[in-house]
Image: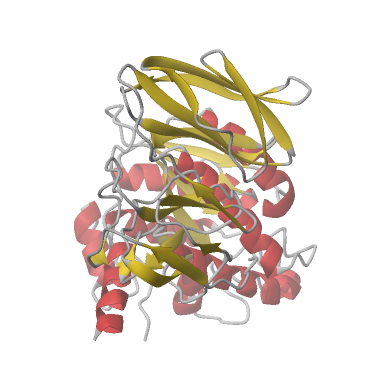
């Protein structure tokens, strides 16, 4: 019984609304931190990847601090403190791993680096949202086993740190129609999301920030209601 | 993640009670008890469990509330929300203790003697990776300490307290000031990683 209530508490905390003015500056703002997938590479011109869509969905400022080719365990964690110290964002969304996978970095090194940047952000009073990297396919499919491992680390640290989870990996698994050559990617490259893929990512992050379990049967409808979107706008599929 | 084996044997007296505390009681100083101070920038939040009480999650740069204990109890330091026990030591005093968590643990004796009116006591705990020892200046009093350890409690006039932490070669690590109340003991915690990120925190005890 005690375990049941503990799990219930953990589950509840993961789906709590996190859009708050944590630093009391009168504005709720978000910073997105990551590599080219945060920067928006592969998107149609001018759409700005998932961060810009996120800002449009929620009507709040979103600062895009994605840098192409960045690895978490080297340059990513190195630049993180300066980005945090120079930002007034209340919430930081962290998504890294696609390039760590090129170098086959171990999941233990990835975990150490991710915990370190979580600690820096949290010590500065920011709420952290963790992104679980989606599995590349096709020309970049060899990175898959590594991003799978990193996604597992992200889920674990999400629970341990009470950090809301934006599970892009699960979204890809539930939403891709072609599991071998997912149509949410630029193909045949298979690493960067296309226009539709970035829509999916923005919907996943929006749900995480609003405390909506987008993978629940009613998740898409709940998000559409919360964002005042027409029925069918949210294309992320639930878990079957 | 570095996981060490830990079983803490805590022999204390006074206090008592059970239940869970998380964040509450941070400004109270019980007559005896044990708490955790988290200085490890690479480590997950931890929780200290002793005598049926839990500190709740304690994150990097923070400290938990004191857990009061009665008699001899087994205390353990866990990675939060897991059953993974981490770090090790034993505490054998009936006074207040702080367990510094940083690449392992170190147990500190906290100040419990009476402090004259008009004065406060202040120590500096060094939790900055990459610096073996630091020099400390607290309202004109000087000292030094090694990583994961503490200076003595300096007796200083109550009111505004200035502090400066430097490397042995004089490089600034951290500094600042705070208002110290008469007859209260304080800990200035500096934690992080040299040249990467350092944060300071001041609290009672």
> Would residue B145 be seen by someone viewing this image from the given angle?
yes
Q: Position of residue A231 (x, y in %)?
A: 23, 65
Q: How many marks?
A: 0
What kind of colouring is applied to the model shown? secondary structure
Decide: is B106 above or below B159: below
Quarter of the image containing the C terminus of chain A?
Answer: bottom left
Q: Out of A57 and A60, give the one closest to the viewer.
A: A60
What residue is drawn where x is 50% and y is 59%? A131
- Residue name at image x 44 percent, y 54 percent: A129
Q: Residue at x 44, y 78 (%)?
A: A174
* Picture residue at 27% right of the left edge, 28% below the top: A26
Instruction: From the viewer's perspective, tell me whether residue A174 is left or right of residue A148.
Output: left
In the image: residue A239, left or right of residue A38: left
Position of B166 with respect to A2 (left or right) is: right
Frontmost residue, B111 versus B171: B111
Above or below, A119 against A81 in this view is below
For the N terminus of chain A, the image quarter is bottom left
Q: Position of residue A164 (x, y in %)?
A: 39, 59
Drawn side of residue B131 relative to residue A59, left or right: right
Task: List x then y, in percent, for residue B106.
Answer: 59, 53
Of A215 and A159, nearer the camera is A159
Q: Is residue A44 visible?
A: no
Locate residue B181: give its quadrant: top left
Q: Position of residue B194 (x, y in %)?
A: 69, 36
Quadrant of residue B82 in the image? bottom left
């Amino acid at each position: 019984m005690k375990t049941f209530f503990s799990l219930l508490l953990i589950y509840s905390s993961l789906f709590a609304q996190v859009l708050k003015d944590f630093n009391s500056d009168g504005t709720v703002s978000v910073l997105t931190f990551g590599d080219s997938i945060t920067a928006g590479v592969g998107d149609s011109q001018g759409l700005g990847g998932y961060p810009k869509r996120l800002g449009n969905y929620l009507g709040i400022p979103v600062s895009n601090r994605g840098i192409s080719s960045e690895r978490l365990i080297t340059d990513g964690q190195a630049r993180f403190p300066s980005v945090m110290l120079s930002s007034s964002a209340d919430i930081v969304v962290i998504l890294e791993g696609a390039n760590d996978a090129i170098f086959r970095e171990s999941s233990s090194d990835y975990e150490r680096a991710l915990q370190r940047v979580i600690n820096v952000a949290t010590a500065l009073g920011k709420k952290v949202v963790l992104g679980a990297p989606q599995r590349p396919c096709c020309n970049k499919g060899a990175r898959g086993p590594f991003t799978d491992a990193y996604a597992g680390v992200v889920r674990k640290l999400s629970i341990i740190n009470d950090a809301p989870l934006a599970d892009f990996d699960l979204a890809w698994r539930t939403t891709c129609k072609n599991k071998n050559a997912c149509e949410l990617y630029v193909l045949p490259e298979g690493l960067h999301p296309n226009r539709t893929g970035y829509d999916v990512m923005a919907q996943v992050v929006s749900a995480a920030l609003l405390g909506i379990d987008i993978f629940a049967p009613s998740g898409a409808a709940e998000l559409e209601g919360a964002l005042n979107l027409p029925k069918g706008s949210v294309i992320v599929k639930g878990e079957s | 993640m570095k996981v060490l084996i830990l079983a803490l044997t805590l022999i204390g007296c006074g206090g008592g009670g059970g239940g869970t505390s998380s964040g509450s009681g941070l400004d109270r100083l019980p007559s005896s008890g044990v708490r955790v101070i988290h200085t490890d920038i690479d480590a997950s939040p931890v929780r200290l469990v002793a005598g049926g009480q839990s500190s709740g999650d304690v994150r990097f740069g923070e400290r938990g509330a004191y857990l009061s204990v009665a008699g001899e109890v087994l205390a353990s330091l866990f990675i939060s929300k897991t059953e993974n026990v981490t770090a090790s030591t034993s505490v054998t005093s009936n006074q207040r203790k702080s367990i510094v968590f940083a690449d392992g643990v170190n147990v500190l004796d906290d100040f419990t003697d009476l402090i004259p009116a008009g004065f406060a006591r202040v120590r500096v705990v060094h939790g900055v990776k990459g610096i073996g020892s630091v020099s400390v200046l607290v309202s004109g009093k000087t000292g030094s300490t090694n990583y994961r350890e503490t200076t003595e409690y300096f007796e200083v006039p109550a009111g505004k307290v200035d502090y400066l932490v430097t490397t042995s070669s004089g490089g600034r690590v951290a500094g600042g000031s705070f208002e110290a109340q008469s007859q209260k003991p304080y800990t200035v915690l500096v934690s992080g990683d040299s040249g990467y990120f350092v944060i300071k925190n001041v609290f009672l005890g």
